[in-house]
Image: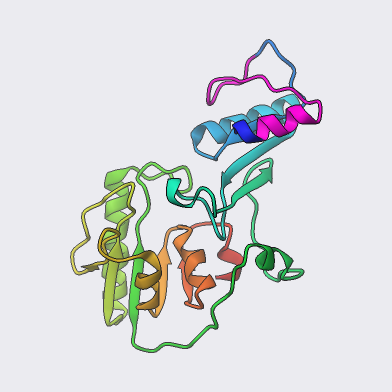
Amino acid sequence: LSAFAEGLAQVGRPCVWAGHGAVRPDIEPAAIVVDGMRASGWAACAEGRRRGVPVIVIDTGYLRRVTGAADLETGHFYVGLGGLGWLPPVAPSTDRLDRLNLRLGRSVERTDGAALVCGQVPGDASHGLARGPLAHTYSRLIADLNIAGVRQVRFRPHPAGVIDPPPGARVSHPSEESLGAAIERADFVVSLNSNAGLDALIAGVPAVALLPSHYRPIA
């Protein structure tokens, strides 16, 4: 946000800082800039619609993204207008992928029947489930996969929101195996709407998103 504010200032658009989730009533902004789409992000978008001003959303990128200090210099952020965008079913060109130096893996049909279930953070705005309901959802999901005859089901907890592995699932723990390695060993990846599903598609592995997500139209 600081870098974005500096850029606006250089083009003659000074910024006024407000508390996260609170738009000051004493100013009439030309635009609202918010970091991410947690609860406060949704509130800022609603406030922008009420005031009739655009809301610029800055979040971790979908493709080669920033997820922490380790990739702050090499990753990319996502900038959207009025919320988070959606990936088109057909890309107009490969220019964006080329600029990110991103290469898509060739999709390979796999028949071993190994599923990777990727967990998400409890309370995240993308699904709205607290720890208990989220854990129950994963237990039901893995039970359904076992009933459907999936040979092997592995559960990968989110590094920032650990949920006990559901019964009947092996564990791919983030501290022991990278996400890329876990995806490589899977025939398909299942999540509510984790960005890990997009990582799987980039690697050429089929993905299933159970809730609306930016990549669901191409999963």
Q: Quadrant of residue 35?
A: top right
Q: Residue at x 68, y 63 (%)?
A: 99
Does the image show residue 53? Answer: no
Which quadrant holds residue 178? bottom left
State the residue lying farthest toward the front: 73
Near-viewer residue (59 or 86) = 59
Numbered marks: total = 0
Q: Is residue 166 visible?
A: yes
**Residue 33: percent from left, percent from top:** 65, 32
Give the magenta part as a residue range.
4-24
Relative to 95, 216 lies left or right: left
Looking at this view, name the residue that lies furthest to the top.
Answer: 26
Quadrant of the image containing the C terminus: bottom right
Relative image position of residue 169 (x, y in whole percent):
22, 68
Q: For residue 212: magenta?
A: no
Dividing the image into 4 quarters, which one contains the N terminus? top right
* Nearest the eye: 146 or 45: 45
Residue 204 position (above or below residue 217): below
Q: Residue at x 74, y 34 (%)?
A: 54
Task: Write the residue at 39% across / 77% down.
Answer: 184
Q: Is residue 123 left or right of residue 132?
A: right
Residue at far left of view: 167
Residue 186 location in percent, x, y? 37, 77
**Looking at the picture, how far across and down is residue 151, in whole percent?**
27, 82
